[in-house]
Image (tube, coloured by chain):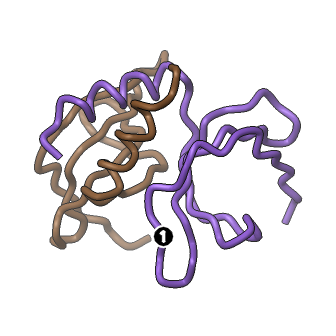
Chain colours: A purple, B brown
């Protein structure tokens, strides 16, 4: 499997943690040296392994924020 | 490939749309008849095809909302 290089440029925060210590985190990440994107993903402790996740643009985060603020959570 | 059954119980909204009409949507979805979860995912028009995405609990959405409200977007 090809290597994926990533650099976490900014840790925004974690939104949950599993019993095994994996955290679902929002970060600003540069993948393979490309321009950094926001990324919502599961991570093992110390970012040793990554789970599935999605990347999001600033514009998408704004829209998501607005949707969430209009929900009764 | 095994069939995945899903029922979109609530459409919260879309946060972006690609040139080909795929939308990144936040929905409340029941997968294979199980209890519905929030789901952030890319969808083709009419929900004919789905892209990658993640499921989120109500608690995770609350934390995500709070993180986003504290960012300068």
Q: Is residue A39 above or below residue B45?
A: below
Q: Quadrant of residue B42?
A: top left
- Please tell me whether mark 1 sits on a helix, a strand or a loop: strand
The answer to whether residue A51 is seen in the rendering is yes
Q: Residue at x 12, y 44 (%)?
A: B10
Q: Quadrant of residue A31?
A: top right
The answer to whether residue A53 is seen in the rendering is no
Q: Is residue B36 above or below residue B19?
A: below
Q: Chain of mark 1?
A: A
Q: Quadrant of residue B41?
A: top left
Q: Residue at x 54, y 23 (%)?
A: A58
Q: Is residue A6 above or below residue B42?
A: below
Q: Residue at x 61, y 36 (%)?
A: A38
Determine the residue located farthest toward the front in the rendered image. B70
Taking depth in this image into account, of A21 and B15 the one nearest to the observer is A21
Task: Please state if A32 lies on the left or on the right of A61 as rendered.
Answer: right
For disc 1, the marked residue is A17
Total of numbered circles in the picture? 1
Taking depth in this image into account, of A64 and B14 the one nearest to the observer is A64
Where in the figure is residue B26, as x and y percent of width and height?
A: 29, 40
Determine the residue located farthest toward the top in the rendered image. B19
């Amino acid at each position: 499997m090809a290597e994926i290089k990533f650099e976490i440029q900014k840790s925004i925060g974690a939104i949950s943690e599993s019993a095994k210590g994996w955290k679902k985190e929002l970060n600003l990440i540069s993948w393979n040296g490309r321009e950094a994107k926001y990324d919502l993903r599961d991570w093992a402790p110390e970012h040793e392994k990554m789970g599935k996740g999605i990347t999001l643009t600033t514009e998408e985060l704004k829209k998501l924020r607005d949707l969430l603020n209009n929900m009764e959570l």
